[in-house]
Image (tube, helix red, strand yellow):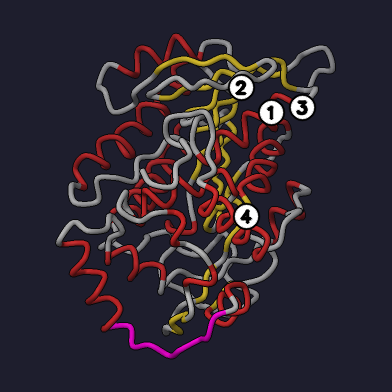
């Protein structure tokens, strides 16, 4: 990068879990001159060099708005994602898939030289649960029954075509595991547990048992560590996909130790049936199809991120989960609409 040029970065979904961490990381970076955060609802968050603009990517006319906002940008980080309503996948498809395609088209039209896209471990096809895990060449066809995985996988195919047609644009795809930090706890409790689950109930002393399920091995990462990988992708010259996760894999035994709870073997069909009943009754927003996907997600090998980006996670998996649990009890949040803190709503 030219030493006299400071980057102008546009971040979609800038008020969410990753977005709030990323805009902070970018605002501290001396190579970044300005950050424009886009969101459906403007936040009450002031950071040096960060401006905000309202943008709803689900609207058909948002591409024209994006074209004006992206003019002159050096990089676009696309984080915007809608998790709900899980009972109406058409709504999430229009926002997540069609909205993402509008962003990609606007990047091309504005001549932005770099696009960093938030993919996910959820884009991967079912795979092995053992270390060292799969690298970035593992198929990305997702678990088709889960809308989240289906949408992430579809966008991988869209980006395949985008890269072929736009070789001059540097495209980076981030595929992180499950992301946690203290201030994301209230948002994530609402997304997956619903508004009827008080944060005060997510306490280790109230969770005496941890179910040991076939396939319950997954990877997590502190959100701030994910944000650092995104920052490195923005300010460097890397391209291609990157797996992101903390060094250890989380399983029932690790959860039991973290929660000081007894690990009890449980049959997957029984647990799934209970979740499906609650979901169909609209008692919880977490879909049983996503539960199916979690039990099939492969363990990832994150060597490429370390070697190419020079990235290293600062937090362990247990530290990321502990931060989430602490935030759930405290009702922690951020001064943004998606991340608003509350124990009860």
Which tag is nearer the camera, tag 2 or tag 1?
Answer: 1
Query: Which residue is the site of mark 2?
Result: 9
Q: Which of 304 and 265 is in front in this view?
A: 265
Residue located 62% across and 78% down the image: 257
Q: Report if the CB atoms under discs 3 and 2 are less than 8 Å apart.
A: no
Q: In this view, does 148 lie to the left or right of 211?
A: left
Earlier in the chain: of badge 3 and badge 2, it is 2
The image shows residue 242 at horizontal and vertical percentages of: 61, 52
Q: Report if the CB atoms under discs 2 and 1 are less than 8 Å apart.
A: yes
Which tag is nearer the camera, tag 3 or tag 2?
Answer: 3
Q: Is residue 206 left or right of residue 276?
A: right
Residue 231 visible in the current orientation: yes
The quarter of the picture where the N terminus appears is: top right
Query: Which residue is the site of mark 3?
Result: 29
Residue located 80% across and 18% down the image: 2
Which tag is nearer the camera, tag 4 or tag 3?
Answer: 4
Instruction: Write down the region rendered in magenta.
Output: 261-269
Q: Disc 3 on helix, strand or loop?
A: loop
Query: Which residue is the site of mark 1?
Result: 26
Q: Disc 4 on helix, strand or loop?
A: helix
Earlier in the chain: of badge 4 and badge 3, it is 3
């Amino acid at each position: 990068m030219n030493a006299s040029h400071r980057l102008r970065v546009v971040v979609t979904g800038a008020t969410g879990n990753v977005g709030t961490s990323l805009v902070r990381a970018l605002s501290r970076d001396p190579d970044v001159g300005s950050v424009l955060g886009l969101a459906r609802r403007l936040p009450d968050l002031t950071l040096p060099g960060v401006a905000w603009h309202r943008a709803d990517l689900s609207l058909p006319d948002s591409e024209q708005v994006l074209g004006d906002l992206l003019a002159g940008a050096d990089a676009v980080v696309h984080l915007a994602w809608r998790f709900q309503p899980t009972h109406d996948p058409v709504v999430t498809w229009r926002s997540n898939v069609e909205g993402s395609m509008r962003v990609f088209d606007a990047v091309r039209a504005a001549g932005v030289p770099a696009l960093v896209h938030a993919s996910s471990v959820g884009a991967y096809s079912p795979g092995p649960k053992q270390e060292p895990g799969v690298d970035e060449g593992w198929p990305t066809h997702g678990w088709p029954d889960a809308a989240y995985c289906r949408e992430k996988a579809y966008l991988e195919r869209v980006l395949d075509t985008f890269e072929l047609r736009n070789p001059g644009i540097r495209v980076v795809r981030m595929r992180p595991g499950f992301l946690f930090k203290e201030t994301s706890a209230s948002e994530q409790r609402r997304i997956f547990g619903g508004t009827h689950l008080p944060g005060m109930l997510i306490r280790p002393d109230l969770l005496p048992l941890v179910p040991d399920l076939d396939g319950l091995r997954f990877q997590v990462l502190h959100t701030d560590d994910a944000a650092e990988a995104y920052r490195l992708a923005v300010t460097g010259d890397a391209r291609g996909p990157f797996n992101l996760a903390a060094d250890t894999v989380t399983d029932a035994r690790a959860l039991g130790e973290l929660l000081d709870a007894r690990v009890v073997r449980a049959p997957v069909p029984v647990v799934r049936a209970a979740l499906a009943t609650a979901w169909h009754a609209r008692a919880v927003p977490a879909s049983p199809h996503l539960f199916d996907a979690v039990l099939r997600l492969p363990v990832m090998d994150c060597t490429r991120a370390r070697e190419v980006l020079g990235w290293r996670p600062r937090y362990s998996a247990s530290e990321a989960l502990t931060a989430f649990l602490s935030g759930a009890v405290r009702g922690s949040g951020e001064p943004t609409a998606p991340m608003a803190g509350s124990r009860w709503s």
